Image: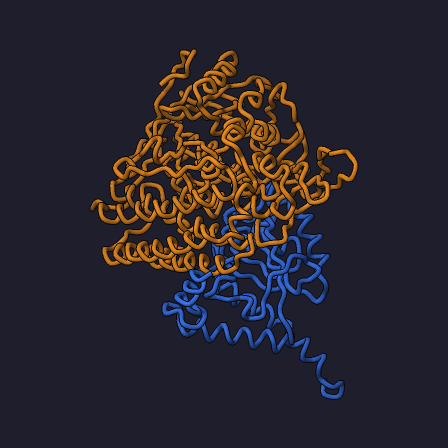
Amino acid sequence: MQIPGLNLDLDRLPAALPIWHATVSLDAWLPAARGVAACGGRLVALWGSDAQSPGSQLPLLSEGLAVNVAYALESGLVWLALPLAGDAPTYPDLSEIFSPAARLQRATADLLGISAQGAADARPWLNHGAWPRDHFPLRQSVPAGEAFPDARQQDYAFVRVEGDGVHEIPVGPVHAGVIEPGHFRFSVVGEKVLRLEERLGYTHKGIEKRFTQLPPLDAHRLAGRVSGDSTVAYAWAYCMALESAAACDTSQRARWLRAILLERERVANHLGDLGALGNDAALTFALAQFSRLREDWQRLSNEQFGHRLLMDCVVPGGVARDLDPAGAARMSGQCDAVEREVRTMRAIYDEHAGLQDRFIATGRVTPELAAQLGLTGLAGRASGRHHDLRCDHPWPPYDILEVKMATHRHGDVAARVAVRFDEVLESLRLIRAMLVTLPAGQVRVDVQLPVRPALGAGWVEGWRGEVFVALELGGAPDGSPIRRCHCHDASWQNWPVIEHAVIGNIVPDFPLINKSFNLSYSGHDL
Amino acid sequence: MWKIIKQVARSGIRTETQPKSSDALHVEAEHIQRRVLDILGRALTIREVDAGSCNGCELEINALSNPYYNLEGLGIKFVASPRHADMLLVTGPVSRNMEQALRHTFDATPSPKLVLAVGDCGCDGGVFGESYASCGRVSNIIAVDVVVPGCPPAPIEILRGILTAVRRIEPARTDKRLPATLA
């Protein structure tokens, strides 16, 4: 494993997926980014860290502030850390090479006071005025309890569109439906959208600072609440990172059960979205049908795993609950029943002229635009981006399942619907295959926290896209506390793409386009 | 169209005949509908406000509209504006970035109004607690009538919470209807 054109000293982390780590110097920062871009790699995450820890020996971690970046290459993931000197350090801007870096860099500046030199947009992103601009909550020197109750919200400098007949429609943060909060500023002429500017960060609740207050063996509960709809993906990515830092291996049975949980989460979300997309195009029948299927699905999850959304089922060292043969049989039977109904619904969707009229060519992201903007996950696959960790780096049990990747090239709402249908059917196949091959054995092992400071990383293909967790543990004697836990959601990459997807569409199609991406606000805002 | 009709016929009316749902659930649903009509004399309208949740509560609130719970069949409806609402259903620890929006939504809701805090976070801050970015429980920001704990609470628990909140305004309304001499 090496980035083309560089000779980095990469350490392989003990994880189920191929993940490497290296500390780099300032002069390698931009060449690394260009090398990754040149060989078709992509930016997975960018975050800041503060590893000030007086007295401790840190073989891997850098002292003081650092900016970190994770790139996905054909042969795996590379996590690069760039240590920075001084109290208000800067590093070279990456957004010219990888456009998703822009908002990640703004968030890093808000939380740690590390800024990208030369970045075109330096407006605050997560800090809406809740804390002073010269206060950086994620620094180690800042106590976790410090708050600013008298701080006032600041105005945000939206980009103005000028011209004859142009007017603005502000939407949110409280939306009309039962959805998460965020602000959308539309500039329109008549019904046509000229420009959309998003302002997010409303659900920022200090998750990353909160991690540093929790014992590592309990923090999977917090990880499972970064984005409730992806609780399994986050809990698994967190546990993978913890097990990687602790060099601990889980049992075969636990891996199978985790994958069953992950696929169940994918099916539940796709069923919900397929119904909501029909509903947004005025086919309320579809919402009734799919929400009924989803409810059946959630009830069986509750019956077999003790939680309707599967929260807290993935735990450090394995899973919280075993599955008995009777439960497996019920689950398999349900997969058959759901498959029949989904196939019926797909035929109805395909033949429904009114529905297809709303879906086709709406909210289009061409493969070229998708590649340029770094579109990822499910939405990426609907725009010709062939990435799915279950296929690219099949970790157990995916290595024996031969997951079939669902892709499309049209990049419109119809394509994102088609990918969901394909993925539901594939996940149903995977669940049944895993139930048949479920290995015997225990479902949970003890995780011994590392004595020395350690790094770990987790990388999982959630239903929306890849979830990445980077973890730094402090080591003994104080119980190996979490020094930094960064969680990254694919929504970071995909939110800016919606701004492009709506251009030229009519305002009433925005809910449909937005739903077809169904991005997380909470997973993005943290 | 034929396929849609066939699928509808095959699915049947799940609100009535869903085999796994207990009778208790069905009786409870009828009971709630009667109470809502008795007390309010009309539909109950709800404005949902996510004040910083992880979106888990929203998934379960949305589930209330599926055929099994059939919320609209009970005369309870989610509305798009707080100005049309009798009740605010608030989730999440209130993030500091949502504090102002939550206050504005509360002020825009006509009185008398009910506030239901849904989920562990809304009840006590949950796993997120209070911090530079989180104000914690909903009642730290606006007056709350009823809390529904759970992470997230199941749809039927949220439905029970709605009924409990409606019951709380019952005595006041009843008093108003009584002749002054009997009051």
Q: Residue furthest left?
A: A440
Is residue A43 visible in the rendered image? The answer is yes
Q: Residue furthest bottom?
A: B181
A282 or B159, nearer to the observer: A282
- Tell whether A181 sits left or right of A160: left
Give the vertical position of A479 relative to B157 (above or below).
Answer: above
Residue at 32% in and 33% down: A394
Residue at 46% in and 44% down: A222
Give the number of callouts. 0
Percent position (x, y) of residue A234? Answer: 43, 41
Using the rendered view, name the quadrant where residue A17 is placed.
top left
Percent position (x, y) of residue A173? Answer: 65, 46
A372 or A394, nearer to the observer: A372
In the rendered image, the quadrant that contains the C terminus of chain B is: bottom right
Question: Colour scheme in the image?
Answer: by chain
A492 or B167, nearer to the observer: A492
- Tell whether A122 sits left or right of A318: right
Percent position (x, y) of residue B13? Answer: 44, 69
Q: Residue furthest right?
A: A164
Give the vertical position of A186 relative to A93 (above or below).
Answer: below
Is residue A46 visible in the rendered image? The answer is no
Percent position (x, y) of residue A292? Answer: 43, 60
A197 or A360, nearer to the observer: A360
| Picture colour for chain B | blue
| Picture colour for chain A | orange
Residue at 54% in and 73% down: B32
- Tell whether A329 sits left or right of B51: left
